[in-house]
C-alpha cells in the first residue's frame, strides 16, 4: 500500500535564520513524486516563541492531508493528533470530495492525543491568546482593526509561502519589518513563521482551490500551545462563496480541542473593508495587496492593485498608502486594466457605485469601461488560450495582449 508518512519531527536551531528555532517534519512518499522519496518540511519561529512549539501531529495532519488526498494515498503520522481534529478531518475530506468529485477520502493512521493532554486543556494549562493571520492585505487589516469584546493579541505572518515563495531574504525582511511597524502601532504582537511549504509536495496540493487555509493552519498549529483561537480573514463575501480553499465551511473543520479556527469578514464587501483600512494611518502605511511583487510593495499593474487603489483614491487616501508608489490614480489607468476572472469582476463591480457615492464619477466610469471591455473580449478568450500554447505564436500572443491591455508582459498571469 502506497502512502504519505510523517516519519519523525525534530526541534533545533534554524540553520538559515539566526535567533530562530526550527520545527522540522521528515515526510516519506512510498511512491516518489518528482523523484523525491523523502523531504523535510520546516517552520522557523523566533526564539521568543519557541516554548510554544508543539511535538504533536496536528500541524502535520493539517499540512499533509491535502497532499494525501491529492495523491489518493493514505496518510500516516508518527505523532499523536487531537481527537476533535481527527474527526473534523474526515468531514473536511467529505467536503473536498463533494466540491471535486475526482478526489477521494483517504485513510488516516495516527494515535489520538493522550488523556493527560486533554486534562491539561480543561485545566487551562494551554495558551489562551487570540491570533489572526496577517498578510498586510485589506482582509487581514480589517480583522486586526475591528473593535471587539475579546481583543486580538497576536498577528501571525507566514513568510516564504504563497505570494512570497520566491521572495529574496531581503524582500522577506522588508515585509516583516513593515508589518512589525504596523503591529506595534496597533498594539499587537507580530508572530512571524517562516516555512518552506511551497518547496515541498505541498505545492502540488492546489493551494488556491483546496489546501490554502489548511497550509495556513499548519503554520499556526506549530505554535498550538500559544493560542486558543485563530481567526482567518475571509477571502470571499456572501455573494462569492464558492468551492475553494477560502470557503468558510472548511475553516472551522481545521479546529482542534485546543485551538479554534474561525473565518471572519464574510459578511462585508471588499470596498467596505477598504473603507475600514482607510481610517488607519498604520494600515495605509503597510498595506500590501499584490500577489505579484513578491515583497512589501504593490505593482500597480495587476487587477488587484488597481481595484484597491481605485477605492483608496475615491476615499482620498491613496497618497498615504505609500506601498502603491503614487499620490493619485489616473482614471485611464483603471480603464485599461485586464479584468478576466469572475471573482475580479465581482470586486471590480463594487467600484462604480462606491466611487460615485464618494464623489468620483470619473473613476466609476473608468471601472465600468474596464468591465465592458472584459465582456467584449470573452468570446475570444478560448482562441487566445489555444494560441498561447503554440510554440511559434505563443510569445507574440502574450505581447499582443500586453499592448492591448497596457500591461506588463513579465507580470501577467498566464491562464
Image (cartoon, rainbow, N blue to C red):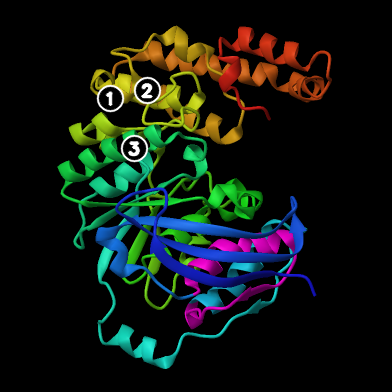
In depth, the one of 187 and 114 nearer the eye is 114
From the image, state whether disc 3 or disc 1 is nearer to you. Answer: 3
Query: Are the two marked residues, 2 and 3, in contact with CB atoms closer than 8 angstroms?
Result: no
Q: Residue 157: within the magenta?
A: no
Q: Secondary structure at mark 1?
A: loop
Q: Give the Cα distance between marks 3 and 1.
A: 20 Å
Query: Nearer the N terminus, badge 2 or badge 1?
Result: 2
Picture residue at 23% right of the left edge, 22% below the top: 320
Query: Are the two marked residues, 3 and 1, in contact with CB atoms closer than 8 angstroms?
Result: no
Label 3 sits on residue = 173
Query: Are the two marked residues, 2 and 1, in contact with CB atoms closer than 8 angstroms?
Result: yes
Task: Give the crowd class for mark 1: few <14, some 14-19, many >=20 residues within 10 Å.
Answer: many
Label 2 sits on residue = 309
Rendered view: 364 above or below 199: above
Q: Which residues are magenta?
A: 57-84
From the image, state whether disc 2 or disc 1 is nearer to you. Answer: 1
| Number of numbered discs visible in the structure rendering | 3
Label 1 sits on residue = 321
Amino acid at each position: 500500500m502506497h502512502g504519505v508518512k510523517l516519519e519523525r519531527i525534530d526541534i533545533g536551531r534554524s540553520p538559515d535564520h539566526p535567533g530562530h528555532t526550527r520545527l522540522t517534519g521528515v515526510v516519506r512518499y512510498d511512491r516518489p513524486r518528482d523523484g523525491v522519496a523523502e523531504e523535510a518540511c520546516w517552520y522557523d519561529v523566533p526564539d521568543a516563541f519557541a516554548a510554544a512549539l508543539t511535538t504533536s501531529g496536528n500541524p502535520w495532519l493539517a499540512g499533509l492531508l491535502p497532499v494525501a488526498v491529492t495523491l489518493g494515498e493514505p496518510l500516516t503520522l508518527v505523532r499523536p493528533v487531537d481527537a476533535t481534529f481527527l474527526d473534523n478531518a474526515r468531514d473536511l475530506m467529505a467536503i473536498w470530495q463533494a466540491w471535486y468529485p475526482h478526489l477521494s477520502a483517504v485513510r488516516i493512521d495516527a494515535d489520538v492525543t493522550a488523556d493527560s493532554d486533554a486534562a491539561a486543556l480543561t485545566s487551562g494549562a494551554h495558551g489562551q491568546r487570540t491570533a489572526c493571520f496577517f498578510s498586510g492585505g485589506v482582509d487581514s487589516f480589517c480583522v486586526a482593526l475591528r473593535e471587539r469584546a475579546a481583543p486580538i493579541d497576536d498577528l501571525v505572518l507566514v513568510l516564504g509561502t504563497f505570494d512570497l515563495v520566491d521572495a529574496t531574504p531581503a524582500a522577506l525582511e522588508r515585509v516583516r519589518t513593515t508589518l512589525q511597524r504596523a503591529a506595534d502601532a496597533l498594539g499587537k504582537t507580530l508572530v512571524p513563521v517562516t516555512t518552506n511549504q511551497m518547496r515541498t509536495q505541498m505545492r502540488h496540493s492546489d493551494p488556491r482551490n483546496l489546501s490554502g487555509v489548511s497550509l495556513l493552519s499548519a503554520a499556526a498549529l506549530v505554535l498550538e500551545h500559544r493560542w486558543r483561537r485563530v481567526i482567518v480573514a475571509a477571502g470571499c463575501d456572501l455573494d462569492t462563496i464558492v468551492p475553494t480553499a477560502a470557503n468558510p465551511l472548511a475553516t472551522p473543520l481545521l479546529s482542534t480541542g485546543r485551538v479554534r479556527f474561525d473565518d471572519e469578514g464574510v459578511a462585508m464587501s471588499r470596498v467596505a473593508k477598504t473603507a475600514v483600512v482607510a481610517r488607519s494611518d498604520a494600515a495605509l502605511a503597510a498595506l500590501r495587496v499584490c500577489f505579484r511583487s513578491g515583497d512589501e510593495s504593490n505593482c500597480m499593474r495587476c487587477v488587484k492593485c488597481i481595484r484597491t487603489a481605485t477605492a483608496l483614491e475615491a476615499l482620498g487616501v491613496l497618497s498615504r498608502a505609500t506601498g502603491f508608489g503614487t499620490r493619485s490614480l489616473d482614471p485611464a489607468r483603471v480603464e485599461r486594466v485586464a479584468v478576466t476572472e469572475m471573482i475580479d469582476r465581482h470586486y471590480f463591480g463594487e467600484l462604480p457605485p462606491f466611487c460615485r457615492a464618494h464623489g468620483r464619477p470619473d473613476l466609476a466610469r473608468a471601472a465600468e469601461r474596464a468591465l465592458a471591455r472584459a465582456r467584449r473580449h470573452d468570446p475570444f478568450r478560448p482562441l487566445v488560450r489555444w494560441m498561447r500554447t503554440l510554440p511559434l505564436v505563443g510569445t507574440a500572443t502574450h505581447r499582443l495582449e500586453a499592448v492591448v491591455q497596457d500591461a506588463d508582459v513579465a507580470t501577467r498571469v498566464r491562464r
